[in-house]
Image (tube, rainbow, N blue to C red):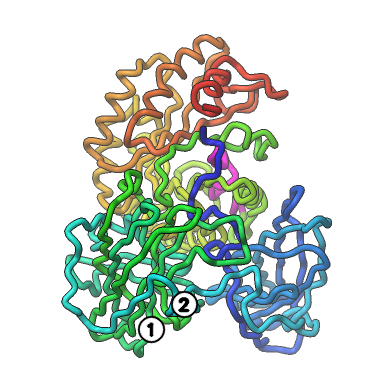
Amino acid sequence: MHKSKLPHPVLRSLVKRTCAVMGTSAALAVLSQSAFAACTYAIESEWNSGFVANITIKNDTGAALNNWSVNWQYVNNRMSSGWNANFSGNNPYTASNMNWNGNLAAGQSVTFGFQGNKNGGQAERPTINGAACGGATASSASSAPSSVPPSSSSVPSSMPGTSSSSSSSGGYTVPANNFAQNGGVENNLTNWGSTAATVTRSTQDKRSGAASALISGRTANWHGITFNVGSLVSGNQYDVAVWVKLAPGTPDSVIHLTGKRLDDSDSTTYNEYTRVSTVTASSTEWRLLQGYYTQSGTTGFQHFIIEAESTTVSYYADDFSIGGQAASSSSSSSSSSTGGTTRKFIGNITTSGAVRSDFINYWNQITGENEGKWGSVEGTRDVYNWAPVDRIYAYARQHNIPVKAHTFIWGAQSPSWLNNLSATETAAEIEEWIRDYCARYPDTAMIDVVNEAVPGHQPAGYAQRAFGNNWIQRVFQLARQYCPNSILILNDYNNIRWQHNEFIALAKAQGNYIDAVGLQAHELKGMTAAQVKTAIDNIWNQVGKPIYISEYDIGDTNDQVQLQNFQAHFPVFWDHPHVKGITIWGYVNGRTWIEGSGLISENGTPRPAMTWLLNNYIRK
């Protein structure tokens, strides 16, 4: 049942524009001295058709390096996406620094990474050239490569469904059958997101209510605000509108409203984009973008995009509305990154730090067991080991399944060097960790932002020292700032059975800072179906946030005991309307953290509980 591709917007084909970070141009860097840095190319992981690689620039010149740019070229390989740099060109490629990693003191280094396709060859190790490395700058295309789509801002205004509005009000009336949820940005950023750059909920300016959506940090014209309306009925026409305003002091700029279907299998055409409306926006008044969109084509609807022709302007959006017939599945996305799908996932974790080749045979969501924890990634201050996490994301992208990050902030498995820092230094390091993770993995679907914070569990004392008693809210604010499209989860230990009321009180105190709650479920053995359902109902009724069963297992070497517990609990998870997905915590005998919780042997022979899952849920 769940083995088909998930229509998750940030995990679709990497050659499509919302997953690419390659810009249309990149200025060459200027060095502060004539000496050259050391540039190295490394393959982090590879599989039959693709690879993940990184380039490290080490400033061993003895002087500061202010901004950098490097170039490389393949024979057969081609790059498909990247992180921690601005990319341009189409073999040869150019990478230049972002605004936060361009200045390297003597002895410092910076690493950026990318994923690529082998195209029938081997994973190549090209020579790195460019201003930073002392080589001649390789030539590169002056416009976006063919593998990166043009901005939908280049769509001709004569395309079907196009209309425009340039008035500040136009006498527009929102349709009575408007089904946009949170169009006024009153419920945090539910259904709002971005194709790239940073979207935040702003109270500095708004057309109505208390807030609006603000996009900042744009570096390309396709960087825009998205709004998720769920599924649309093919052939039906919809009245779509949103109000926009430029940031203070910004010269007038053209802004477009575009409808976007899910990507099809053709990576060379961009018929999924339909222009709805265009307006010249102002920083002094709110102006209306309004037009009509008709759903068509062979793929389902994804979202609407509000984007500017200028590559750098920041702007607000508010009061999004859509009138017409809502599809039955369009109702309850908890985040723009759900893509309108209501299908639940059945996920699992890595096995002893690796992704087994049979993973995709059973599971359609992946979580790193330990690889993504802060202590695993940054055991030494300012030295990241991304390779194990890169392998997880490469596998997920290859198989089009979502990744859940586990975990940003936890009192256990955190870097020991934090204990030696001041509160101010700790706060800076927490922000740097979240920022760097989100920059490298912007397609993270879900994040266990704070783990086991209930008193008596393992709350992060270092975060409380850094931010005070409101440390949980501050950590979620940072996660929202740097990972605006991810579902942000408050995760805790066995809150179905233990410290149930304490967790509810903690979750309620976080208000709109959290998107969802994670219910670890390691010790449910012996609980009846009715007991489990009552506990989940109680959490939903009091907290009112979507629920993820984040770490389920039954540890018992007796096959029948494990099977009976799965048969009692799993249908409750699957049938509960507010449980969005289930992650089982390990599946290989002898390689799980709780004895007897494995579901298959090393050679793939299933235990009875796994056979039951396969027959009733996984292959249904």
Q: Residue at x 46, y 19 (%)?
A: 566
User: Which element is circle 1 on?
Assistant: strand
Question: Which residue shows up at 72% across the image and 23% down it?
Answer: 603
Task: From the image, tell me which residue sits under label 1.
Answer: 254
Three-letter code for the amino acid on which mark 1 is drawn: Val
Callouts 1 and 2 close, C-beta under 8 Å? yes
> In this figure, which residue is indicated by the disc labeled 2?
153
Q: Specify whether 602 is left or right of 482.
A: right
Q: Residue 593, located in which quarter of the rendered image?
A: top right
**Count of numbered marks:** 2
Q: Position of residue 500 (x, y in %)?
A: 29, 30
Residue 365 position, x and y percent, is 53, 40
Structural crowding at the residue carrying mark 1, measured as other residues with C-alpha within 10 Å and reported as few (<14), some (14–19) or many (≥20): some
Residue span colored magenta: 364-379
- Residue 259 in which image quadrant: bottom left
Of labels 1 and 2, earlier in sequence is: 2
